[in-house]
């Protein structure tokens, strides 16, 4: 990909590079390819996870536009919303979160952190959340009347600007692979809003990674993500003019592992999370990484990636999202 002056500004927020580590005990137990973790759960302590890489570019754009308020949206336990609230506090900005659902009687996980950080929270019904554009427009008008400029970051920071987070992460991955002396058959991740997957696809092109990019959807279906990613690609091409024909980029999404639905999990996923924790000391969450890693193990058992020597799984964080699932993961004995 040729260089171009139309590159976005970046506000350094994440602790980079994150480690690439082998999962040797688990790999030995399972047989097959050697599994590696790209530890993007370590981008920060509180604002941890993949969202922070995207926010480096989204927030820089907001700052360039003289924003004083960051507005964003997601589920009640959104990792992205929590990361945005942390970053806003770090930079002296206000934060307003539009959360789909009701305020629970007990605050925990990401939502508890949102409140501690002082984010303004609006809880929206499903119908109101479906009309998000109007909700955002009303909020912008509200803040403008108070002499403030609000900047909207979409769900997951997954738009043409947020894509740069994982475009540039591919340069880091390339250096990781060189240092480890590996040529992975695939980089595997969860996808919930499409931005990480789309960024990895563009980054592979930009930095010449010779590895497949594969994702497990944790909600919706492959067709929904394909349309969303193609739309983000189109806006990215128009805004940044990098001279890339994104229509030729393959979108590889493996379906079948959404389970009971978005932000819901079953006993199999909980068992995978516990097994990885007890084998490698790594915590996955039931919403994103636990589902995707469970899907990866299931596909390996079916023979996918046969003949591969190394596979890299992108740990996108989500630790705080584990806490609301305690009762489901360890139900009380009724006996």
Image (cartoon, helix red, strand yellow):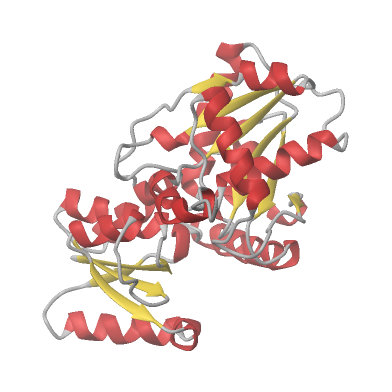
Residue 297 percent location from the top left of the image: 73, 36
Residue 80 occupies which quadrant of the picture?
bottom left
| Residue 64 can be seen in this image | no
Is 211 left or right of 108, judged from the image as shown? right
Which residue is nearer to you in this view: 62 or 176?
176
- Considering only vertical position in the picture, is 214 above or below 154? above
| Residue 74 can be seen in this image | yes
Which residue is nearer to you in this view: 144 or 264?
264
- Considering only vertical position in the picture, is 136 above or below 16? below
- Name the residue rendered at 63%, 63% in the picture: 219
Which quarter of the figure is the N terminus placed in? Answer: top right
Which residue is nearer to you in this view: 111 or 147?
111
Is 32 left or right of 290, judged from the image as shown? right
- Name the residue rendered at 38%, 65% in the picture: 153
Residue 315 percent location from the top left of the image: 53, 37
Residue 289 percent location from the top left of the image: 56, 44
Residue 308 occupies which quadrant of the picture?
top right
Count of numbered badges drawn on the protein: 0
- Name the residue rendered at 22%, 64% in the picture: 119
- Name the residue rendered at 77%, 56% in the picture: 256
Most extreme residue toward the front, as rendered? Answer: 335
Which residue is nearer to you in this view: 167 or 304?
304
Residue 292 percent location from the top left of the image: 64, 46
- Considering only vertical position in the picture, is 189 above or below 232? above
């Amino acid at each position: 990909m040729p260089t171009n002056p139309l590159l976005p500004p970046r506000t350094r927020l994440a602790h980079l590079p994150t480690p690439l580590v082998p999962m040797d005990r688990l790999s030995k137990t399972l047989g097959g390819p050697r599994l590696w973790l790209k530890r993007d759960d370590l981008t920060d302590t509180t604002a941890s996870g993949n969202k922070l890489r995207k926010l480096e570019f989204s927030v820089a754009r907001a700052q360039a536009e003289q924003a004083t308020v960051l507005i964003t949206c997601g589920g009640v336990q959104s990792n992205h919303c929590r990361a945005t609230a942390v970053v806003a506090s770090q930079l002296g900005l206000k934060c307003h979160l539009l959360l789909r659902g009701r305020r629970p009687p007990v605050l925990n996980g990401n939502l508890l952190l949102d409140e501690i950080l002082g984010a303004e929270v609006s809880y929206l019904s499903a119908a109101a959340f479906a009309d998000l554009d109007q909700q955002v427009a009303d909020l912008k008008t509200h803040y403008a009347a108070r002499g403030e400029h609000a900047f909207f970051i979409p769900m997951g920071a997954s738009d043409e600007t947020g894509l740069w987070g994982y475009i540039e992460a591919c340069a880091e991955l390339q250096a990781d692979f060189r240092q480890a002396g590996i040529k992975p058959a695939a980089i595997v991740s969860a996808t919930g809003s499409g931005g990480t997957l789309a960024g990895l696809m563009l980054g592979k092109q930009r930095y010449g990674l010779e590895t497949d990019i594969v994702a497990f959807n944790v909600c919706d279906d492959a067709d929904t993500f394909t349309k969303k990613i193609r739309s983000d690609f189109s806006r990215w091409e128009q805004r940044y003019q990098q001279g890339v024909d994104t229509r030729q980029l393959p979108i590889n999404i493996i379906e079948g592992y959404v389970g009971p639905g978005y932000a819901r999990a079953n006993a199999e996923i909980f068992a995978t999370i516990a097994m990885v924790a007890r084998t490698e000391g790594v915590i996955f969450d039931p919403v994103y990484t636990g589902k995707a890693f469970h899907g990866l193990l299931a596909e390996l058992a079916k023979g996918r990636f046969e003949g591969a020597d190394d596979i890299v799984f992108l740990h996108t964080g989500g630790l705080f999202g584990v806490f609301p699932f305690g009762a489901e993961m360890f139900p009380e004995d009724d006996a």
